[in-house]
Image (spheres, rainbow, N blue to C red):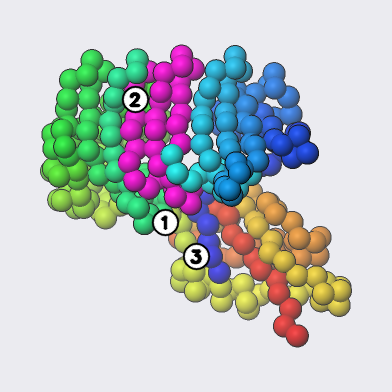
């Protein structure tokens, strides 16, 4: 059973049709889809692949018509980017130019300040299959400049300063050697109310100490981010499903098969909440998949900087008849 880790919920709402050679989506900055252009923070247009290509053309625009994104995707929606993808600030300046493989950054990634100057350059592993690696620092830091163009990191060596998304304050900083974090790092993630200090050796996190907004101190090692998991991992979860799923009789008689995708939240205590059907197959199979998941024992919760956090998850549950 393959478990898919997700950070945000997506919904698919289609307006337009491929008879018109494009689909149009109205989207909020939080990723939610809305019905009208006036309610959207940006507009996504997905067009048919070019001749001799299998990749869809993805274009995003700000409400004023300014370009927000240009890229190619192997899926209609949500996008799974492939190759080079460029994003732009609302002022028209470049925001980033990055390479993707299977929807995950792979290869060079250049980021820019809103004034158009180069902010940082990274290199992501070409064989990266774990989206969590991006958040956990699983990349090389090649270059880093201040907003006036002064070099802080050159050819993977120097002192790196990372700003928050709006460039309002420095979220983390520390020495870099050969592109890897090395030595003592410190940071302040104001969006989650967490300050931290960490020690790295050749890119590996040796240990860290964080303090949350309530003043609680936590220690951690190996990784800042640990995703939740069923006790026993994927094999244990597969066994739980096999032992508890009962194929609905009507669906069996009618030969109904398919994969139901469920989304849910793993709470800080490991309990599962907000269980819902993301991809339906048939009412009977949907109901059975949801019933079994609601009876799941508590999971091992995910952690962020050593403290439990709520994490959204998605799991596919496959119903197949053996003849």
Who comes first in sequence, dot 3 or dot 2? 2
Q: Residue furthest bottom?
A: 323
User: Mark 1 to mark 2: distance in Å?
Assistant: 25 Å
What is the total number of numbered labels drawn onto the structure image? 3
Residue at 17% across, 32% down: 153
Residue at 47% across, 61% down: 229
Q: Which residues are magenta?
A: 85-114
Residue 311 makes an appearance in the image: no
Who comes first in sequence, dot 1 or dot 2? 2
Which labelled disc corresponds to residue 112? Answer: 2
Graded by Cα atoms within 10 Å as few (under 14), some (14 to 19) or many (20 or more), the crowding at tag 3 reads some
Q: Main secondary structure of the magenta part?
A: strand
- Front disc: 3 or 2: 2
Residue at 74% across, 40% down: 18
Q: Which residue is mark 3?
A: 230
Q: Nearer the viewer, residue 155 or 231?
A: 155
Q: Quadrant of residue 117?
A: top left
């Amino acid at each position: 059973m393959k478990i898919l880790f997700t950070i945000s919920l997506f919904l698919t709402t289609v307006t337009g049709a491929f008879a018109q050679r494009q689909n149009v989506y109205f989207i909020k900055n939080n990723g939610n889809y809305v019905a009208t252009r006036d309610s959207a923070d940006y507009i996504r247009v997905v067009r048919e692949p070019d001749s001799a290509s299998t990749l869809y053309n993805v274009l995003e625009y700000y409400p004023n018509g300014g370009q927000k994104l240009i890229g190619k995707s192997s899926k209609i929606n949500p996008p799974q980017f492939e190759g080079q993808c460029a994003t732009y600030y609302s002022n028209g300046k470049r925001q980033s130019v990055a390479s993707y493989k299977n929807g995950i950054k792979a290869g060079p990634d250049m980021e820019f300040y809103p004034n158009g100057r180069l902010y940082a350059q990274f290199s992501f592993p070409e064989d990266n299959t774990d989206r969590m690696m991006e958040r956990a620092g699983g990349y090389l830091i090649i270059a880093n400049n201040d907003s006036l163009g002064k070099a802080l990191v050159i050819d993977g060596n120097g002192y790196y300063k990372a700003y928050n998304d709006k460039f309002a304050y420095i979220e983390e900083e520390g020495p870099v050697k050969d592109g890897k974090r090395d030595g003592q790092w410190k940071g302040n993630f104001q969006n989650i109310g967490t300050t931290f200090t960490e020690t790295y050796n050749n890119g590996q996190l040796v240990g860290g100490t964080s303090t949350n907004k309530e003043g609680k101190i936590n220690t951690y090692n190996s990784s800042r981010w640990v995703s939740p998991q069923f006790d026993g991992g994927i094999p244990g979860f597969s066994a739980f499903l096999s032992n508890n799923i009962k194929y609905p009789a009507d669906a069996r008689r009618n030969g109904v098969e398919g994969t139901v995708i469920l989304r849910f939240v793993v709470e800080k205590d490991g309990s599962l909440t907000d269980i819902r059907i993301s991809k339906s197959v048939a009412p009977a199979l949907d109901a059975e998949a949801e019933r079994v998941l609601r009876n799941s024992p508590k999971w091992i919760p995910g952690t962020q900087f050593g403290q439990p956090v709520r994490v959204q998850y998605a799991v596919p549950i496959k119903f197949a008849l053996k003849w």
